[in-house]
Every structure is written in structure tokens, then in C-alpha cells.
């Protein structure tokens, strides 16, 4: 069965100012690499639909949704008076006139990909979208993230599509505090992650609920140690949980070249992690995996890591 590649051109139009690492060029680097290596030909490319704003309420407070929409729409209509063209949501997160549209496509991609794998149209899918999502909490946009696409998709699969248990894997170098905030205590969801600590957002070391398995690791931890931790801690938990769907918050900023973190992963480590998750998906979830781009700021490394990840997802 095919692997889907979901994206949308509107995801490029959201940007947060000159020099911001979470930039539109990230998606260009990924698209170029997938094209250059011929992978694009083997993937089922799909335009991300717009999420219904009601989808966002599966994981977010109405106030947050309304605020992002209002700021973005005001900027688009010129009513806002913000000469910079941006409004600040937190010290490193801004919206521009296109942010609302971009975020709706990003969430829409992950929800549509989830539907496609549940419907059996696709086996696995990668969503090349931005803004990313895993720092967005129920009520707060932060850390480059506006809405939490993976958390929305998990709730969509459970509340609307009748699945009973969904695994969320977060391998971004930063702790997925937003996802944790939304899913903590929801025993239909198991969230497993590793992340550098200490590092933004400086959370995740204290257990918040029994459905969260966090592995904080110190700076300069390299691939072999991460693999060993995953094998020892994640795999038995996932096996016991028997997820019907695997959602991945796929950040590639734990790569050794990435400037936002200090971990030492390389392409082969991402291939290994993806392979192990494929094994779990095949054992428990009819192979169903939906992966969504989170971080990854060294453009060349990001592009190579996504290529590697998608190759394993699609068995190419
Ligand atoms: Zn990150």
C-alpha cells in the first residue's frame, strides 16, 4: 500500500521574520531532496485540506483558536496597524497574515493523513508542514507552534473514528510539552519521547501522568545510547499498549549538525528509529503510521533525515 506525502503551498507563507530558524526554506529543502532523489515519484502526493476549526477544539481551548485567527485576519486585512506585519504570541512565536491559513493546512494534513491510513487508502504518511505543533499546549501557542496537529489527530482518531488506543512518538530534540499538556491522563493515548535536558522548554523531567514515558538525556548523547534507551524503555511499553495507530512528532533537530540542540544523532539513527516503529506498527496497528514534521533547522541535515525517514516509512 502506498505512502502519502501531505503538504500545501500555504504552509510556506507563514513566517516569523528575517533570520528565524523556523523558516519556509525548511519545506523547500525537503521538497527538493525528495524530488532529487526520485522519492517523490514513489509517494502519493496529496494537497493538505483545510482543517475545520472545530477539529482544533479537540485539543485546544476556543480562546487560543480565536486569538490566532483574529490576529492573522487583522494582519491580512491591514486593520491591525502592526507595521512590522507580525504579532507576537510568545518571545519566539509570531503570526503573520498567513499564519492562520498555514496552521489550518498543517492540522488538516495530519487529520487527513490519519483518515487515509484508517480508511486503508494509505499505509503510512509523512506531512511536510509548518508551523510545527508539539509545543502548543491546550491554551497557549509557543515555541514556534500555533496548534498541536498530532494531538488533534490523536483525538480525531479516538473520538470520531472509533480507535481505542493511539501511540504518539516524539523524537524532536525538545520536550513536547504541548502534547504532554493535552494528552496527560488520557489513557487511550501513550506518549513516548526522548529529548535533550536541560533545553527549551525545560519540562518533562517530572512525571505528569502514567500514560507518558519521557526519556530526558544530557547534551552530547549520541545515537547508540539513544537506541539502547529506546529498545529498553519504549519498546516493551509500546508492545504492551498495542496501539492501533502510530503518530510521530518527527523533529530532526537532535541531528548532530543542528544548531538548536546538542545531541548527536545521524541519518542512520533516524532510519533505525523509524524501522523499529514500522515493526511495532506492523505488529499491532496494521502498519498505520502518520508522521508530521516538527523541528529540524539545519537545512541539509533536515532534508537528508526526512529522506531517510520517508524511505523507511515507504520501504523504498
Ligand atoms: Zn525541536
Image (cartoon, rainbow, N blue to C red):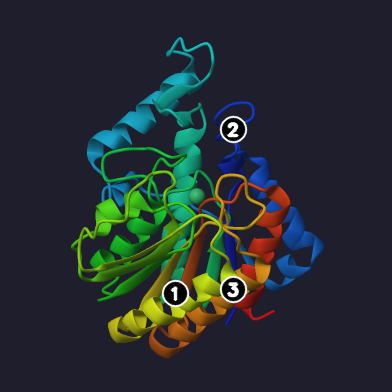
- Specify few, some or many for label 2: CA neighbours under 10 Å numbering under 14, 14-19, or 20 or more: few
Q: How many marks?
A: 3
Q: Residues within 10 Å of mark 3 (few under 14, many from 20)?
A: many
Residue 171 locus on image (x, y percent): 48, 62
Q: Disc 2 on helix, strand or loop?
A: loop
Closer mark to the observer between disc 2 and disc 1: 1
The dot on residue 3 is 3
Dividing the picture into quadrants, the one containing residue 271 is bottom right
User: Is there a contact, CB below 8 Å, between mark 2 and mark 1?
Assistant: no
Which of label 3 and label 2 is nearer to you?
A: 2
Is the C terminus in the top left, top right, bottom left or bottom right quadrant?
bottom right
Residue 177 drawn above or below residue 15: below
Residue ID at (59%, 33%): 20
Residue bearing the label numbered 1 = 229
The answer to whether residue 98 is left or right of residue 60 is right
Instruction: Say whether residue 218 is visible.
Output: yes
Spatial CA distance of label 3 from label 2 is 31 Å
Q: Upstream in the sequence, badge 2 or badge 1?
A: 2
Judged left or right of residue 187, residue 116 is right
Question: Closer to the camera, 296 or 257?
Answer: 257
Q: Quadrant of residue 6?
A: bottom right
User: Which quadrant holds the N terminus?
Assistant: bottom right
Do the residues bearing badges 1 and 3 touch, measured as CB atoms within 8 Å? no
Q: Mark 2 — residue? A: 20
Amino acid at each position: 500500500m502506498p505512502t502519502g506525502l501531505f503538504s500545501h503551498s500555504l504552509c510556506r507563507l507563514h513566517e516569523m521574520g528575517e533570520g528565524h530558524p523556523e523558516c519556509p526554506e525548511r519545506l523547500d529543502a525537503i521538497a527538493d531532496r525528495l524530488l532529487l532523489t526520485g522519492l517523490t515519484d514513489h509517494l502519493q502526493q496529496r494537497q493538505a485540506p483545510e482543517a475545520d476549526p472545530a477539529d482544533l477544539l479537540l485539543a485546544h481551548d476556543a480562546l487560543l483558536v480565536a486569538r490566532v485567527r483574529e490576529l492573522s485576519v487583522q494582519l491580512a486585512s491591514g486593520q491591525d496597524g502592526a507595521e512590522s506585519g507580525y504579532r507576537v504570541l510568545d518571545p519566539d512565536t509570531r503570526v503573520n497574515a498567513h499564519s492562520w491559513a498555514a496552521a489550518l493546512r498543517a492540522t488538516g494534513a495530519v487529520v487527513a493523513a490519519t483518515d487515509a491510513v484508517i480508511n486503508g487508502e494509505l499505509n503510512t504518511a509523512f506531512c511536510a508542514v509548518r508551523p510545527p505543533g508539539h509545543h502548543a499546549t491546550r491554551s497557549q501557542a509557543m515555541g514556534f507552534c500555533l496548534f498541536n496537529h498530532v494531538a488533534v489527530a490523536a483525538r480525531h482518531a479516538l473520538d470520531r473514528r472509533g480507535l481505542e488506543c493511539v501511540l504518539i512518538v516524539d523524537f524532536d530534540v525538545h520536550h513536547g510539552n504541548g502534547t504532554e499538556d493535552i494528552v496527560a491522563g488520557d489513557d487511550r493515548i501513550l506518549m513516548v519521547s526522548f529529548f535533550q535536558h536541560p533545553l527549551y522548554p525545560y519540562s518533562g523531567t517530572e512525571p505528569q501522568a502514567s500514560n507518558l514515558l519521557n526519556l530526558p538525556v544530557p547534551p552530547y548523547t549520541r545515537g547508540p545510547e539513544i537506541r539502547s534507551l529506546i529498545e529498553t524503555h519504549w519498546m516493551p511499553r509500546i508492545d504492551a499498549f498495542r496501539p492501533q495507530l502510530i503518530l510521530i512528532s518527527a523533529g530532526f533537530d537532535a541531528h548532530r549538525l543542528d544548531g538548536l540542540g546538542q545531541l548527536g544523532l545521524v541519518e542512520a539513527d533516524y532510519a533505525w528509529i523509524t524501522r523499529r516503529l514500522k515493526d511495532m506498527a506492523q505488529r499491532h496497528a496494521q502498519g498505520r503510521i502518520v508522521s508530521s514534521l516538527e523541528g529540524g533547522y539545519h537545512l541539509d541535515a533536515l532534508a537528508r533525515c526526512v529522506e531517510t525517514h520517508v524511505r523507511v516509512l515507504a520501504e523504498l
